[in-house]
Amino acid sequence: MSIGHTLLGLLESGPRHGYDLKRTFDEKFGHDRPLHYGQVYSTMSRLLKNGLVEVDGIESGGGPERKRYAITEAGITDVADWLAQPEKPEPYLQSTLYTKVVLALLTGRSAETLLDTQRTEHLRLMRILTDRKRGGDLADQLICDHALFHLEADLRWLELTAARLDRLAGEVVA
């Protein structure tokens, strides 16, 4: 996820302080990985330097001064361009799971045990996500569905690899 583009998109509804941006980001997108304040302010500093935001005002209070940021026309164009670009599908051609299976075979360890252990971990995470999905709002349900579909694909791969393990061993150990 592009943090900068996401923060710019949040600014399209109106100027905000860094604290407000962090809070809104965490509510909408950061359920599992909230932003750190330092990340918000370093990103805003970069966006300011690149002319995508401007300081709309500075407020003094009981603590440090708070800058209010506003998106510029260049920032609006940048967000529009980013939203129009499709995301590159991730084919996972250099899978860590595949590497572990091959190394297990090459070193005489049990690739079957590795696959069983991984299957168990995937199923555990799928149960957690399914429970979370049941109690979540629509955004949480969609995020969980995305993760569940990827985990289901991994499980299909684990099953296929287990079925072809003898053949794979013959090819990689030869």
Image (cartoon, rainbow, N blue to C red):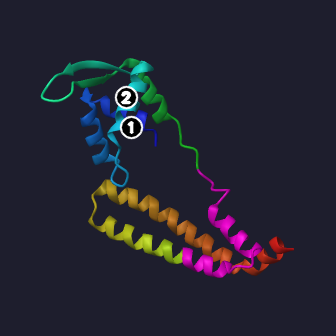
Image quarter where the C terminus lies is bottom right
Q: Is residue 115 shown in magenta? A: yes
Q: Residues within 10 Å of mark 1 (few under 14, many from 20)?
A: few
- The span shown in magenta is 90-118
- Residue at 42% in and 61% down: 145
- Residue at 59% in and 72% down: 156
Q: Nearer the viewer, residue 140 or 49?
A: 49
Residue ranking furthest to the right: 174
Residue 14 visible in the displayed image:
no
- What's the distance in space between the residues labelled 1 and 2, CA to CA? 8 Å
- Image x and y of residue 158, in percent: 61, 73
How many numbered circles are shown?
Answer: 2
Q: Secondary structure at mark 1?
A: helix
Question: In this rendering, would 1 be left or right of 156?
Answer: left
Name the chief secondary structure element in magenta.
Answer: helix
- Residue at 42% in and 33% down: 4
Residue carrying label 1: 39
Label 1 vs 2, first from the N-terminus? 1
Question: In this rendering, would 146 be left or right of 91?
Answer: left
Give the vertical position of 34 relative to 15 (above or below).
below
Residue carrying label 2: 44
Question: In this rendering, would 82 be left or right of 26?
Answer: right
- Image x and y of residue 79, in percent: 43, 30
Give the vertical position of 144 relative to 115 (above or below).
above
